[in-house]
Amino acid sequence: FHPSFVTMSDRAFAVHCIFQQQTITVATKFNFISDITTRATFNGISAMPEPSLTIVNGRVPDEQLTPASLVKVGDAIMFVWNMTHPSEIYGIQVEDCIAKTLDGRKMKILENGCTTDDIIISSVTYGERNQKAFADAMAFKFPDVEDIWIMCSVRTCIQKREHLLIENGISEEHLCKSEPKCDKLRKKRDTNDLIENAKIDGTDNSITVLHNKLQVIDVYANENSTMALSLHSQTQNEMGEKEE
C-alpha cells in the first residue's frame, strides 16, 4: 500500500481484535473500497483451436506450400500440423498417426509423437509455443495399391506459463510438451497392438482426428504412371502461373 495515497493497488480489510484478559471484543473495519474506482473490466471467451494436417514435398515445414498429392516411393515429404488461427492460450500435441488403405490394411507410423519406424518418418518436432509441429518422412506405399490414407490424432494442449496454476481437474497431461518422450531403446511392439491403442476413436473431446490422402507410385512403375506424375506436375505449374 502507498503510505500517503489511495492507489489502484489498495485493498479493503475487515479486522477483528479479541482481548481475552478483559473479555471485550473490539471490532473495526477499514473500508477504502468506495474510493477505488474500477479502471476496466475484461471479459471474453477463448475460441478452441482448429488444427490441420498438410503433407508437402521437400524438407521445408511450410503449410502454405502446395500439398503433395502424387509422389514417388522414396520422395522426401514432410508432415506439417498447425493451428489454423494462432492462439496465446492453446497449442497442439501430435498423438498417433496411422496409414491405411481402402482394403483395410493399416500401419501405425507415430505413437505419442514418436516414430514407430524411423525409415518411414521421424519423431515429431514442435515449433514455438506448440503452434506448429512437423515430421520428416519418405513417401511409402502398401504393396499393390497407390492410394494411402493418413489419419492423425492431435490433442489440444495448454501452453505452459511462468505463473500458471494447475487447478483440480487439470493435470500435467493437459500442458503442451516441447518434445515427445521417445525411448530409442524400446522394443518394437506388435502392429496390431499399436493400432488397437491408437487414439483415433473420437472418444476424447480434446483430440481431433485429421485425415489426408496421398497417391504414391512405385519407382519401377510402368511408363503410364510416370507420365501421370509428369502431367500432374505440369498441371500444378500451369495453375501456379495463372494464379500469379
Image (spheres, rainbow, N blue to C red):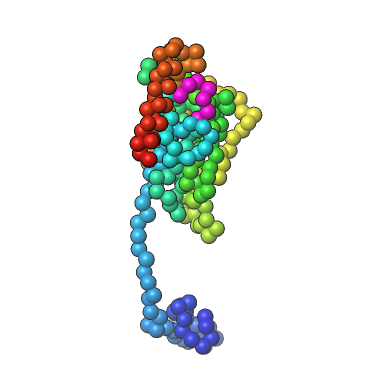
Q: Give the number of callouts.
A: 0
Foreground: 163 or 51?
A: 51
Image height of 86 relative to 211, above or below: below
Magenta range is 71-77
Where does the image place residue 110, in percent across and percent down from the top left? Answer: 51, 30
Quadrant (top left/top right/bottom left/bottom right) for the C terminus: top left
The percent position of residue 239, horizontal first and vertical second, equals 36, 33
Instruction: Please indicate, yes or no, whether residue 61 appears anywhere in the rendered image.
Output: yes
Whether 127 is drawn above or below 116: the answer is below
**As displayed, is residue 69 above or below residue 83?**
above
Q: Is residue 185 left or right of residue 193?
A: right
Is residue 72 part of the magenta span, yes or no? yes
Nearest the eye: 201 or 168: 201
Front position in the image: 54 or 172: 54
What residue appears at the point 39 percent right and 75 percent down from the top-left corner?
Answer: 39
What residue appears at the point 50 percent right and 46 percent down from the top-left corner? Answer: 130
Indicate the position of residue 235 as horizontal and vertical percent values. Answer: 37, 27
Seen at 55% across and 23% down, the residue is 189
Q: Nearer the viewer, residue 152 or 13?
A: 152
Residue 106, x across and y down, in percent: 44, 21
Residue 74 included in the magenta stretch of the image: yes
The answer to which image quadrant residue 84 occupies is: top left
Q: Quadrant of residue 200?
A: top left
Asked if residue 193 shows in the view, the reply is no
